[in-house]
Amino acid sequence: MSDNLVAKDQLKSIVERIERLEEEKKAIAEDIKEVFGEAKANGFDTKVLRVVLRIRKQDLAERQEQDAVRDLYMQALGMLPEFEAEGE
């Protein structure tokens, strides 16, 4: 019976910690929303800002690989100028 009480107390503690963290997460999300609002009010493009933030999370090799694949796709779709061979 003692084990059951310990498990019950432990479960309750875990649930309460998760609930507190969820509240903190909600507050932080609101803070982030306010900062994006401030950025927009100062004339920054928040859509581009979100892209920059996502890119900053990547390491250099990952970013270079993604850029290379994106450029390859865009060139194949005619969205980038084709590079002429030297001497032509």
Image (spheres, rainbow, N blue to C red):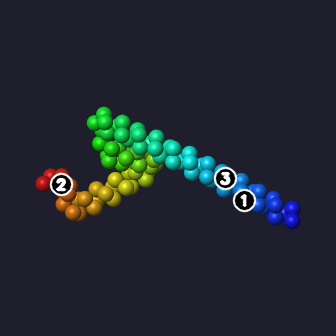
- Quarter of the N terminus within the rendering: bottom right
Q: Residue at x 47, y 46 (%)?
A: 29
Asked if one can make out residue 83 in the rendered structure from this viewpoint, the answer is yes
Q: Which residue is mark 2?
A: 81
Across and down, in percent, residue 74 comes to: 25, 59
- Amino acid beneath label 1: Leu
Q: Residue at x 82, y 64 (%)?
A: 4
For this rendering, which residue is in front, 43 or 69? 43
Residue contact at pointers 1 and 2, CB within 8 angstroms: no
Q: Residues within 10 Å of mark 1 (few under 14, many from 20)?
A: few
Residue 44, image quadrant: top left
Q: Mark 1 or mark 2, which has the lower sequence index?
A: 1
Dot 1: element: helix
- Amino acid beneath label 2: Pro
Across and down, in percent, residue 57 comes to: 45, 47
Across and down, in percent, residue 26 comes to: 51, 48
Across and down, in percent, residue 61 comes to: 43, 51
24 horizontally vs 84: left or right: right
Q: Which residue is mark 1?
A: 11
